[in-house]
Image (cartoon, rainbow, N blue to C red):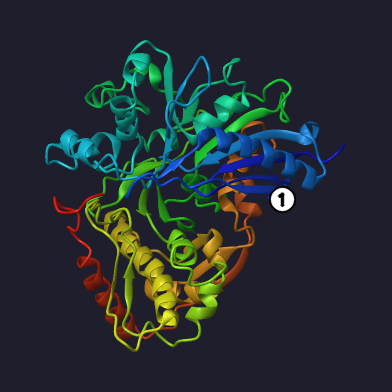
């Protein structure tokens, strides 16, 4: 019998990818294409959803060609996505009413203030999230409030919403011709509209945000057959059977199935998730409580998460906005030419600070500048900022969970940067471990889809497939480690409360 495969579609913040995996969890073909980042105003970030859907069809074709397979060789398709990025579209025409509003976007700050009335934790006991610009619900409210005719169309039942997983699955399964309007528990847990305990939409919160319940997708598990590839598409008839938000997918791909296991993904931002099992653990230290995954009819598994808005995108900013180098890997070359940061700290609060601070009025700062400092020191400060932010989240996680981490599993593009990985180990004080397959986000979506159709026999197959590639041990003297961290904390305070009535955004 010919070998069978699983396809994963990873709809990310800067690009869309399609990857074909074999039964051992190894990559046999892939395609990737970047999409435009749209910045209409300071703090606003948008994507063109039509462009993204076009790109997905293209990268699926490239991945299948690269793997030299067709739909007949695929047993299932899994989808993973940039989670809180929000789209509203017309269920009858398939046309978005506005660009997708990206997770980093801060335009909903006033809506957040109005909803909370000074209480940032108003809904936290139900949804696990503080009131912040990060999440999907307020973005929907903004579209309904600001796009002409949108609210009337929504109330008439013609508009639907979703994170990008919902948009992708709806189009994959037929769009206006019978497309399935669903999301999974992990994505739903990022909207601020889902009750964590019941795994269902909260009508009261939806009403507070002025969102008709008819707009919301059906909430399903992370691993089940939602529908099949549309007729005449490249994936015609193939089960669409896995759906996880990107960070939960990476946790799944890292085989972090035991309570207390954690991973950190280094992408556009950094996202650390710790598995808390079937227990919903409220955070007292600025973290999010979220759904980790749910396999079919099994109970949901929960997690604590720390979200850092700007890490890899800071390197892009140095490359694109400041023209400091031509390609992202050069940042390591520059940073490695100096022994330390020269006293420089770079706090990239471009869209406010996420975990553990949740300060949308913070803005980025470079502090500690002297005439001695050159671009090498700034490059090093950029890499170090990633490690410091990760440590802050890890400290909060250990405080909330009472679990001391034995090692930190890492994945994502920046794990190729050895200077960063070593400094990360030095800052967290535990080994940092990178797997053989660094594309754990796509891999997790593939596993969820494959488990749903019996291609893999559940979590044990994932554990058996996981393999270590490289490990970095802490090497820094503890006194120096703490001195640097104190300096970082001091630098962070300099970014607070920047946005006020005098600041035009």
Look at 29% across and 75% down and name the residue there: 485
Left or right, 64 with respect to 213, comes to: right
Q: Residue shown at 24%/41% (left/top)?
A: 131
Mark yes or no: residue 368 visible: yes
Image x and y of residue 421, in percent: 49, 72
* Residue at 22% in and 53% down: 361
Q: Is 137 positioned to the left or the right of 38 in the image?
A: left
**Image quadrant where residue 175 sits:** top right
Is residue 181 placed above or below 137 in the rendered structure? above
Location of residue 490 in the rendering, given as x and y in whole percent from the top left corner: 21, 72
Residue farthest along the top direction in this orientation: 156
**Position in image of residue 494 (x %, y %):** 20, 68
> Which of 267/98 is in front?
98
Report the residue marked by disc 1: 24
Q: Secondary structure at mark 1?
A: loop
Viewer-closest of 223 and 495:
495
């Amino acid at each position: 019998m010919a070998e069978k495969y699983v396809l994963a579609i990873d709809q990310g913040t800067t690009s869309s990818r399609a990857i074909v995996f074999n039964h051992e969890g190894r990559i046999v073909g892939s395609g990737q294409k970047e999409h435009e980042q749209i910045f209409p105003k300071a703090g606003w970030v948008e994507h063109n959803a039509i462009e993204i859907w076009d790109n997905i069809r293209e990268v699926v074709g490239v991945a299948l060609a690269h793997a030299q397979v067709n739909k007949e060789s695929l047993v299932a398709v899994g989808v993973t996505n940039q989670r809180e990025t929000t789209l509203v579209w017309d269920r009858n025409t398939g046309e978005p009413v506005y660009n997708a509003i990206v997770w980093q976007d801060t335009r909903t700050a006033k809506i957040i203030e109005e909803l909370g009335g000074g209480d940032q934790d108003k809904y936290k006991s139900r949804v696990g999230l503080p009131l912040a610009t990060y999440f999907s619900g307020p973005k929907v409210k903004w579209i309904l409030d600001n796009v002409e005719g949108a609210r009337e169309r929504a109330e008439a039942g013609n508009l639907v919403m979703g994170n990008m997983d919902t948009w992708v699955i709806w189009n994959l399964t037929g769009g206006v011709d019978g497309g399935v309007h669903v999301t999974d528990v992990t994505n739903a847990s990022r909207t601020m509209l889902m009750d964590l305990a019941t795994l269902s939409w909260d009508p009261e919160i939806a009403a507070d945000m002025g969102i008709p319940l008819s707009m919301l997708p059906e909430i399903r598990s992370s691993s089940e057959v939602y529908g099949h590839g549309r007729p005449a598409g490249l994936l015609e008839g193939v089960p669409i059977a896995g759906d996880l938000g990107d960070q939960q997918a990476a946790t799944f791909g890292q085989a972090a199935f035991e309570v207390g296991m954690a991973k950190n993904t280094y992408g556009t931002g950094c996202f650390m998730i710790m598995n808390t099992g079937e227990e919903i653990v409220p955070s007292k230290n600025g973290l999010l409580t979220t759904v980790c995954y749910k396999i079919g009819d099994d109970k949901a598994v929960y997690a604590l998460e720390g979200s850092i808005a700007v890490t890899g995108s800071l390197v892009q900013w140095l490359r694109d906005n400041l023209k400091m180098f031509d390609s992202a890997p050069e940042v390591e070359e520059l940073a490695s030419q100096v022994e330390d940061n020269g006293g420089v700290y770079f706090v990239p609060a471009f869209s406010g600070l996420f975990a553990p601070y949740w300060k949308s009025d913070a803005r980025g700062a470079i502090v500690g500048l002297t005439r001695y400092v050159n671009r090498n020191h700034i490059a090093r400060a950029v890499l170090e900022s990633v490690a410091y932010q990760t440590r802050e989240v890890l400290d909060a996680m250990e405080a909330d969970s009472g679990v001391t981490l034995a090692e930190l599993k890492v994945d994502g593009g920046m794990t190729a940067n050895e200077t960063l990985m070593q400094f990360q180990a030095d800052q967290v004080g535990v080994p940092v471990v990178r797997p053989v397959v660094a594309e754990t986000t796509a891999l997790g979506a593939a596993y969820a889809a494959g488990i749903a159709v019996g291609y893999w026999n559940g979590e044990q197959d994932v554990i058996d497939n996981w393999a270590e590639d490289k490990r970095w041990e802490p090497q820094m003297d503890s006194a120096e480690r703490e001195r640097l961290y104190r300096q970082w904390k001091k630098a962070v305070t300099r970014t607070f409360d920047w946005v006020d009535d005098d600041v035009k955004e």
